[in-house]
């Protein structure tokens, strides 16, 4: 989910190591706010008079801005659900779509007699292009690696798979390089 | 009073139990960070 968890307490590193081991290992880093004593907890405003920190969660976004604070009841485990909800808000799926893909997604599908859905690296797609060229058939090509809206259309036609090449011949869909069917639909032979 | 939503998180560098030094600003422009303060090791809730 594009998130790094950092645990932190005023314990020393050897103490944190031993504790992590006793728990069977902790995969995220436990940071030692030991020297100067509690100085990071102090900066975040969570160092208690007793000399240890509050049980508190801060979510910091990629710009370094705090997006969530929970200074929790010290004798209670904080609720992970709240944290997940905030993280989801910070990483909506739309944010993963680049501006170019977004523009392509907004554009309507092309209208041409033959539309060839391909990827740049697929070997069968090369055969498809050669086949169409050999028969002098004009076509428009869409790279579904780049055009994710087109990829979604292919998934609809191909049982959820992004099968290439996929042909749209005036509304007739042929999934995969089915030469016999292509010749039939294109009126070749 | 703790820091609030909208505040800039202060940068820091601390040693981790996994051996490395960890600096908060290393994650800038890379990913979100969940900083989980806990009182003391060996004191389960």
Image (spheres, rainbow, N blue to C red):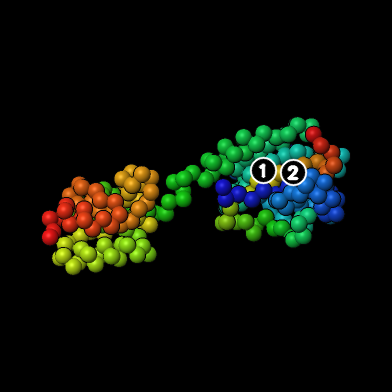
Element type at marker 2?
Answer: strand
Rendered residue at 72%/55% (across/down): B12
**Element at label 1:** strand
Q: Position of residue A98 (x, y in %)?
A: 42, 54
Mark 1: few/some/many CA within 10 Å (<14, 14-19, 20+): many
Q: Look at 46% across and 50% down and name the residue there.
A: A96
Q: Position of residue B33 (x, y in %)?
A: 63, 49
Whether residue A26 is visible here, answered yes or no, is yes
The alpha-carbon separation of the residues under discs 2 and 1 comes to: 8 Å
For the residues labelled 2 and 1, say whether their Cβ atoms are less than 8 Å apart: yes
Left or right: A2 as drawn, with respect to A16? left
Q: Position of residue B36 (x, y in %)?
A: 71, 44
The residue where tag 2 is placed is B37
Indicate the quadrant containing the C terminus of chain A: top left, top right, bottom left or bottom right. Answer: bottom left
- Disc number placed over residue A58 in the picture, else none: 1
Left or right, residue A148 beside residue B36: left
């Amino acid at each position: 989910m594009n998130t790094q968890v950092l645990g932190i307490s005023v314990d020393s590193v050897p103490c944190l190591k031993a504790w992590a081991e006793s728990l069977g290992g902790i995969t995220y880093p436990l940071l030692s706010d030991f020297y100067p004593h509690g100085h990071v907890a102090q900066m975040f405003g969570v160092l208690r008079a007793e000399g240890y920190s509050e049980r508190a969660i801060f979510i910091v976004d990629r710009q370094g801005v705090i997006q969530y604070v929970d200074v929790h009841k010290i004798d209670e485990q904080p609720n992970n659900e709240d944290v997940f909800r905030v993280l989801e808000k910070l990483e909506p799926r739309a944010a993963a779509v680049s501006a170019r893909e977004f523009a392509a997604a907004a554009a309507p599908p092309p209208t041409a007699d033959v539309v060839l859905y391909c990827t740049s690296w697929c070997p069968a797609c090369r055969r498809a292009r050669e086949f169409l060229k050999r028969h002098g058939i004009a076509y428009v090509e869409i790279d579904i690696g780049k055009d994710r809206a087109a990829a979604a259309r292919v998934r609809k036609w191909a049982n959820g798979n992004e099968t290439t090449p996929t042909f749209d011949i005036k509304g007739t869909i042929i999934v995969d390089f089915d030469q016999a069917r292509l010749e039939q639909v294109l009126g070749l032979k | 009073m703790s820091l609030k939503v909208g505040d800039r998180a202060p940068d820091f560098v601390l040693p981790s139990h996994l051996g490395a030094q960890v600096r908060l600003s290393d994650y800038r422009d890379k990913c979100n960070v969940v900083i989980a303060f806990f009182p003391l090791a060996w004191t389960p809730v």
